[in-house]
Amino acid sequence: DIQMTQSPSSLSASVGDRVTITCRASQGINNYLAWYQQKPGKVPKLLIYAASTLQSGVPSRFSGSGSGTDFTFTISSLQPEDVATYFCQKYNSAPATFGQGTKVEIK
Amino acid sequence: QVQLVQSGAEVKKPGASVKVSCKASGYTLRTYAMDWVRQAPGQGLEWVGWLNTGNGNTEYSQKFQGRVNITRDTSANTAYMELSSLRSEDTAVYYCARVRAYSFGYFDSWGQGTLVTVSS
């Protein structure tokens, strides 16, 4: 099975900072990668699919890039409401493996 | 609008089985595949399995093979996940998630989650 390695596991940044999370697949997955946001006590929410396509209604400060095995998720200007855990997920085939998650906090 | 409504919280004893339902509204269930994901307390997201809602085909995580069964009732627009031989490590919130495709794909809508607690 393809493994998804996400880093860092947590980060603390100031409001307005640029935040970057990486996700690496153990084998190539083309661009079959999604990013989800999960706020404390809430249901996960789709932010990005096909590695870089923003889901409808998601603020443009969120973006994604990459293809093959290496992917990046960026918040261009961190806002207080972005405090959450972010997960990457590969979905080209079963199993639809998630990364371990990155907890984002405000410094 | 699309909504996935799951059944309520369950408390089960070790060795028992649990069946969680996920009723879809706002669309026809068999149009899109459905996955199940779980999250143990304080942990990340773990994929459980996938259902082709059209023909009933399934794929399961190796971890749950032989213990999980995902089915659907198209007349009720509802999917189900049954997990047997429960152990304490199965205590988690279980989510259904709609796949934005007929086969494999990303999850664009999630149920509210069902807490399953396994305790003697």
Image (cartoon, coloured by chain):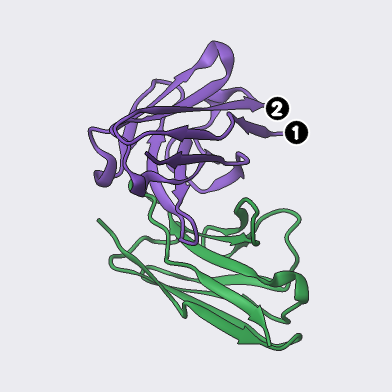
Chain colours: A green, B purple
Q: Left or right: A11 with respect to A59?
A: left
| Residue placed under numbered mark 1 in the picture | B1
Label annotation for residue A53: none
Chain ID, mark 1? B
Q: Nearer the viewer, residue B94 or A5?
A: B94
| Lateral position of residue B117 relative to residue B68, left or right | right
In the rendered image of this protein, does residue A56 appear above or below residue A16?
above
**How far across and how far down the image is residue B2, in percent?**
69, 34
- The reply to whether callout 2 and callout 1 are in contact (CB within 8 Å) is yes
Query: Label 2 neighbourhood size at 10 Å, few (<14), some (14-19), many (20+)?
Result: few
Residue at 56% from the left image edge and 24% from the top image edge: B29
Distance Cα–Cα, label 2 vs label 1: 5 Å
- The residue that disc 2 covers is B26
Q: Quadrant of the C terminus of chain B?
A: top left
| Residue at image point 37% right, 45% down | B90
Judging from the image, what secondary structure is the residue with disc 2 in?
A: loop
Where in the figure is residue A68, as x and y percent of width and height? 37, 68
- Above/below status of B17 relative to A25: above
* Image mark 2: chain: B
| Foreground residue among A32 and A7 | A7
